[in-house]
Image (cartoon, grey):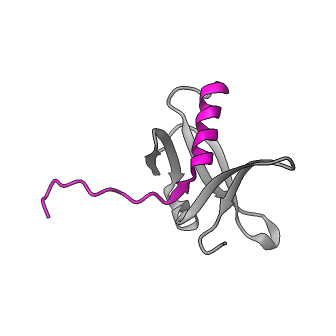
Amino acid sequence: MQKNSTIPVPQPVKLTDKAIAEVRNIMENKNIPEGYGLRIGVKGGMGCAGLGYMLGFDKPKEGDINYEVEGIPVHIEKRQTMYLIGLQVDFYEGSDARGFTFISPGQT
């Protein structure tokens, strides 16, 4: 291996095409400030369900893992990575509900 070769970093969280389209829509139409990206994280205190997932828009912070998904900057706190590896973010839009959904690894 060459000393200065660039090895692509795997993306801990995947976004579906529907999720990418909705994030772009929000970023373009909801006055998200320049330099902000999609922050994906976990929150505790979900009772028997354990951890919950969260999405928001934020600036990158020291200690984040930062990558891009089709031009969308994504930020994840490094210490939360182990809880997020393999997570897939989707967007559901139906007559009964509309919003982002999270598909955990191993969940079908």
Observer-nearest of 14 and 56: 14
| Magenta stretch, residue numbers | 1-30
Q: Is residue 19 magenta?
A: yes
Outermost residue, left direction? 2
Q: Nearer the viewer, residue 24 or 80?
A: 24
| View extreme (right): residue | 96
The image position of residue 91, as x and y in percent, is: 68, 49
Compared to residue 48, the image places residue 15 above or below, namely: above
Taking the view exactly as shown, the residue that stands out farthest to the front is 95
Q: Quadrant of the C terminus?
A: bottom right
Q: How many marks?
A: 0
What residue lies at 66% left-to-right and 72% top-to-bottom? 107
Name the residue rendered at 27%, 58% in the picture.
Answer: 7
On the rendered structure, is 104 left or right of 75?
right
Q: Is residue 60 magenta?
A: no
User: What x and y, as percent, mark residue 33?
Assistant: 58, 26
Q: In the depicted view, which residue is nearer to us: 65 or 22? A: 22
Quadrant placement of the N terminus: bottom left
Q: Position of residue 27 (x, y in %)?
A: 60, 31
Q: In x, y percent, where is residue 72?
A: 50, 40
Q: Is 6 positioned to the left or the right of 47 in the image? A: left
**Residue at point 45% right, 38% down?**
71
